[in-house]
Amino acid sequence: DAMVIQNPRYQVTQFGKPVTLSCSQTLNHNVMYWYQQKSSQAPKLLFHYYDKDFNNEADTPDNFQSRRPNTSFCFLDIRSPGLGDAAMYLCATSRTTVVGTGVGEQYFGPGTRLTVT
Amino acid sequence: SQQGEEDPQALSIQEGENATMNCSYKTSINNLQWYRQNSGRGLVHLILIRSNEREKHSGRLRVTLDTSKKSSSLLITASRAADTASYFCATDAAYSNSGYALNFGKGTSLLVTP
């Protein structure tokens, strides 16, 4: 059974044309994440939500925005994609954990590969 | 910001051999995790080891953690062709204000040939 679903799996957009990637989960996890992963590189955290609390990484460009309308869904909006934004975008979820016990296991979707032409 | 660094960057072995990957990190942690990523796919969680643990096993996987050296190793015993993937370590930061953030290393690319 799919637990973290990302649509579409492949997305082609034009330079400067806004694009939205979507993620849904059936795990009822409080925390949702968006990562950007370029070829042969580590996943880079863009932002994460704890419920509706939004946490933006300091070096995430303003060009990237996110929305989480409810527990199950989370969206990544790229307002004006550049060629450098071509990458795999990974959505992940995790449970909340007891304070002081650290970050728990994350469950990843299959990713959306974004191509910018 | 990236904290973990895996070593080696690439590893090629034959089926049946053991594969060892290492991870080093910089700041104090609560947990260290290992993930696997098949080509073009999402990451799959393999194992989590807490800062007060030294060793953990899961099937053919053995993870060690040395907090004094800020390092961890992942051992895959009796490797199979299906183990071919990239392996990443990920750490949280014990005193981070980033809530639930994990920092991933650059990964080790493992190739297991029949």
Image (tube, rainbow, N blue to C red):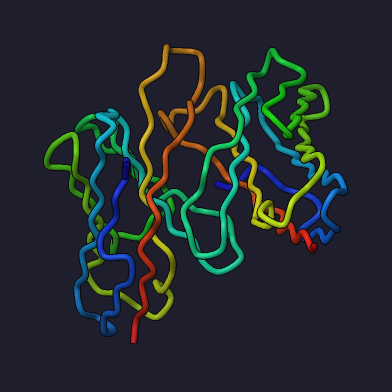
Image quarter of the N terminus of chain A: top left
| Residue B73 shown left or right of residue B102 in the figure | right
What percent of the width, then of the height, locates residue B81? Answer: 72, 57
Image quarter of the C terminus of chain A: bottom left
- Residue at (23% x, 56% y) in the render: A22
- Residue at (43% x, 69% y) in the render: A87
**Residue that lies at the very extreme toward the left in this rendered image:** A69
Asked if B23 appears above or below A52 in the picture, the reply is below
Asked if A101 appears above or below B40 in the picture, the reply is above
| Residue A29 shown left or right of residue B74 in the figure | left
| Residue A39 shown left or right of residue B87 in the figure | left
Q: Which is nearer the eye, B43 or A45? A: B43
Asked if A89 appears above or below B43 in the picture, the reply is below
Q: Which is nearer the eye, B30 or B45? A: B45
Q: Quadrant of residue A80?
A: bottom left
Asked if B108 appears above or below A27 in the picture, the reply is below
What percent of the width, then of the height, locates residue B2? Answer: 59, 47
- Residue at (39% x, 55% y) in the render: A60
What percent of the width, then of the height, locates residue B34? Answer: 63, 38
What percent of the width, then of the height, locates residue B49? Answer: 64, 23
| Residue B99 shown left or right of residue B5 in the figure | left
